[in-house]
Image (cartoon, rainbow, N blue to C red):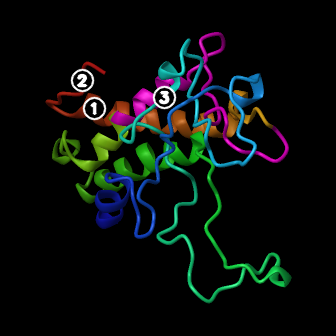
Amino acid sequence: VDHWFAENLAKHKTLQFANIRASAPCRGIMSRGECSDPEETGACGLCYGDGKTNNDKTLTDDDAYFFRMISDVFSYDGTVDERCPELNIPWVWNDWRPVLGENAWANLIAPLQVEYLRNNGDVDKIADNGVALTLATNFLRAVQKMSISVNGGVYYAPRNTFDVNDDDIGSTVSTENNVSLLAGLRILMRVISDKSASSHKPL
């Protein structure tokens, strides 16, 4: 677990993936006609929230969502994708969806829960600059950008996230994913408020 948090999530990479963060700069929202990507190369980037400019809708490698279902490898030599074996193409990792629920678990719930259990509930032993609190507090920037002012919800995914049934899935809200986020935020609030001293208390 420590290796996964420190070497994969904190460094946002795996064995064959140089970056598992959805941090491609926003170059316009495709569903609004602001950008086109006919070759489906990801040229339009990912656009977080409702900022006024593309730069306002861009996050960095430190605070963008992770892609879900992270794998250590892109492809194993000699494998065949069993979903379409007649095509004889190699099995590859092909889920490029950065969604809220999985990110609530990866950035908030899992790392903070591991640290809480490891330290027998003594939150003062959870390091302010450790991996768990760094992942959690960096994630707050994404949550802030993805928050919807009119209803308090948080968008399901950045805009331009691919979905075969909905070309604007980034404008949707998932109750299930927002509940996961709420649970994670409550854990973070409890850890920070219960620590006798923390540089994160102003959050």
- Give the quarter of the image for residue 88: bottom right
For label 3, the residue is 58
Which class describes the residues within 10 Å of circle 1: few (<14), some (14-19), or many (20+)?
many
Q: Secondary structure at mark 3?
A: loop
Q: Main secondary structure of the magenta part?
A: loop
Identify which residue is drawn at 56% across, 48% down: 102
Q: Is residue 139 magenta?
A: yes
Residue 201: mark in rendering: 2
Question: Which amino acid is tagged 3?
Answer: Thr
**Is residue 24 positioned above or below 7 on the image?**
above
The quarter of the picture where residue 165 lies is top right
Distance from Cα at disc 1 to Cα at disc 3: 27 Å
Looking at this view, name the residue that lies furthest to the bottom: 78
Q: Quadrant of the N terminus?
A: bottom left
Instruction: Determine which residue is flagged by label 1.
Output: 192
Residue 159 among magenta residues: yes
Residue lying at 14% horizontally and 30% vertically, measured from the top left: 197
Establish if 118 lies above or below 62: below
Cα distance between the residues tagged 1 and 2: 6 Å
The answer to whether mark 1 and mark 2 are in CB contact below 8 A is yes
Rounded to the nearest angstrom, the CA distance separating label 3 from label 2 is 26 Å
Instruction: Residue 132: give its label.
Output: none
Q: Quadrant of the C terminus?
A: top left
Whole-percent x, y for residue 93 in the image: 61, 67
Residue at 40% over, 38% down = 187
Q: Which residues are magenta?
A: 138-166
Secondary-structure class at tag 2: loop
